[in-house]
Amino acid sequence: MPGALVRYVPILIVFGLWEAATRYGFVSKALVPDLANVGAAFWQLLASGELLFNAGHSLARAFVGLAAATAFGIVAGLLMATIRPVRLLINPLVQVFYPMPKSALIPVVMVWFGLGDMSKIVLIFLGCILPVVVSTYNGARGVDHVLVWSAASLGASRRAILTEIVLPAAMPEILNGIRTALAFSFILMVSSEFIMAKDGIGYLIATLGDGGAYAAMFACIFTVAGVGFGADRMFGLLIRRTLRWREQ
Amino acid sequence: MTHAPRWVALGNIAIQALVLGAFLAAWEITAREKLINPFLLPALSDVVVRMAQDIASGVAIVDLSLTLYRALSGFAIAALIGIPLGVLMARSALFRWFFDPLISAGFPMPKIAFLPIFVLWFGLFDTSKIIMVAFSAVFPVVSAAYAGTQGVDKWPLWSARALGAKERELLWEIILPMALPQMITTVVTEMLMSGKGLGGTMINAGRFADSVGVFGGIVEIAIVGILVIRGVEILRRRLLVWHAEARVEG
């Protein structure tokens, strides 16, 4: 833990520079609120429950979308890797939709699923499923054939091979795909809430900005950034724990 | 499996093209037969006609060039700052100590959340959009440049004569694919702040309940996205015939 603290000293230096710049008037406080004000605004948002309410809503949307994308994505990726017709059917769609920016779908999900939770969940689902499908597919195709053959020669069923050989062997790539999807889910969550929402952290940032409450806006932005960073780090730890058996 | 005969590969391509064709046909038929409310799903042919009109009248060209201009300017700034920074980080312990935590903390952050700050600082016009793109793209650029330089440094004997050229190519090979998705941020900023561009025009169409326009925008953005990514892939393979990864993928 102290090692981690020392490592992040430069971040503290940057915050120190920020505070010094605003305190000694190098930059206008209208453009950059000082840290103390941002901290106070953060505390106020936290105490009033506003921050927790909106952040909770946002995170619930991101989680549902990401969880659904993970479940469907892994199944689709495994089926693509093992069954040729499925591969031929899904692959062209993946190829076409992968490079397409999912945010372009915001107006459509808005029309199709309304302004509530559903439209954001669908958007996050669509954005997150492709990295999971692609990484599962790549991982499953990269599985050592010897493993599959020996399991088959020992009389394992197709299904057992899939769930007990291919899935664990593909796990590192799958988890990395989910990590990418996790980042996407945050981006899509915030940008969709900027554009269309009645609540959520993105909505809160947008309204605070429109109302000129910049210290509070900065506080929310750094909350989102911090939570996004924290989620990624936690997932990284999870990956390392799950894959401990591989590192020998 | 990797060395399938040519006709199998061609057959696969044909089947996949057929799937896409069926997908588009299903879209057209469901819309034509009004199985789905045409407001929710306008017919493909209407969308194509609208896109052709927009191209003929020049609207689409203006939007496209605005979007590309913003995306490329943002990316250029990110490359200008990010590549030297990444190389310095690989070469100097001091730079690595200071910037490594900043980059690794900034990389997984949802950068789009910072957009209101850039609007506050740089106004509603091009500058804030370009800076937003640069800000999103600079993190992958730095880490790609850093990793690329370290990779090169690990093989000091590895044909020193070509090192200068190869190093540069290696950077581009890793950096472009890693930073490309970030350029898509442009479209989001345009949607949020309007002011023309593919994203701005599309969100405007959405506000006026012009669903043909919305779908036209989606198709245009999808086509641009595919063209850019495919273009980079081809460029990569051309530039890096010598590189192992490029050969294996081919």
Image (tube, coloured by chain):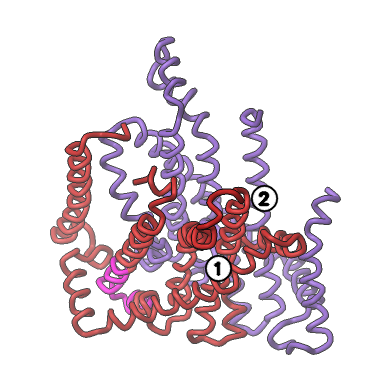
Chain colours: A purple, B red
Q: Which residue is mark 1?
A: B136
Residue A133 placed where, x, y %?
A: 42, 43
Classify residue A84 as left or right of residue A131.
Answer: left
Q: Which mark is residue A233?
A: 2
Front residue of A80/A38: it is: A80
Residue B247 placed where, x, y %?
A: 38, 46
Question: Residue flagged by tag 2: what amino acid is it?
Answer: Arg
Q: Chain of mark 1?
A: B
Question: Does residue A30 sit above or below A185 in this rendering?
Answer: below
Measuring 63% from the left and 58% from the top, which residue is drawn there?
A228
Q: Chain of mark 2?
A: A
Q: Which mark is residue B215?
A: none
Label 1 sits on a secondary structure element that is helix
Residue A121 placed where, x, y %?
A: 47, 55
Front residue of A129/B173: it is: B173
Read off the magenta span: B203-220
